[in-house]
Image (cartoon, rainbow, N blue to C red):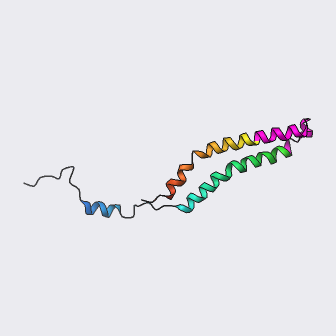
Amino acid sequence: MPRPGGPTQMDYKKAAKDAEGQSWNGRPGLARLIRFILWILPLAGSLTFGFWASQELPPEKLGINRWLWWLGLAAVATIIMRILEHGTKRLTPLTMLLRLSL
């Protein structure tokens, strides 16, 4: 009487045939694009805030000294840039994963 196959017996030819076409190819172009976006996003956010603030909240409208306004604008723009930079750092490992291939 034939013995049933145990859990350690495997059909390697069938497994290799099933695994064909299931490999992961690296996506270096997409990784570069994401890295560029992660680099430019904090800068663009800071510059966008500066442009918006200069249009909507000029020093004459707020009634403060122009030098004090520039100092405040620079401080807030820097804070915005640091917050966005901190948020985008969490996605940095994604670029390395997209460069890998299996």
Name the residue: 67% across, 41% down.
83
Name the residue: 76% across, 48% down.
48
Which quadrant holds the N terminus? bottom left
- Above or below, 68 against 13 in this view is above
- Above or below, 63 against 20 in this view is above
Left or right of 88 on screen, residue 81: right
Q: Does the magenta stretch include residue 11?
A: no
Name the residue: 92% across, 39% down.
60
x then y, percent, for residue 26 = 48, 61
x then y, percent, for residue 30 = 56, 60
Which quadrant holds the C terminus? bottom left
Q: Quadrant of residue 11?
A: bottom left
Left or right of 92 on screen, residue 17: left
Magenta segment range?
55-76
Magenta residues, dominant SS class: helix
- Above or below, 80 against 95 in this view is above
x then y, percent, for residue 77 = 76, 42
Name the residue: 60% across, 58% down.
33
- Above or below, 19 against 91 in this view is below
Q: Is residue 73 magenta?
A: yes
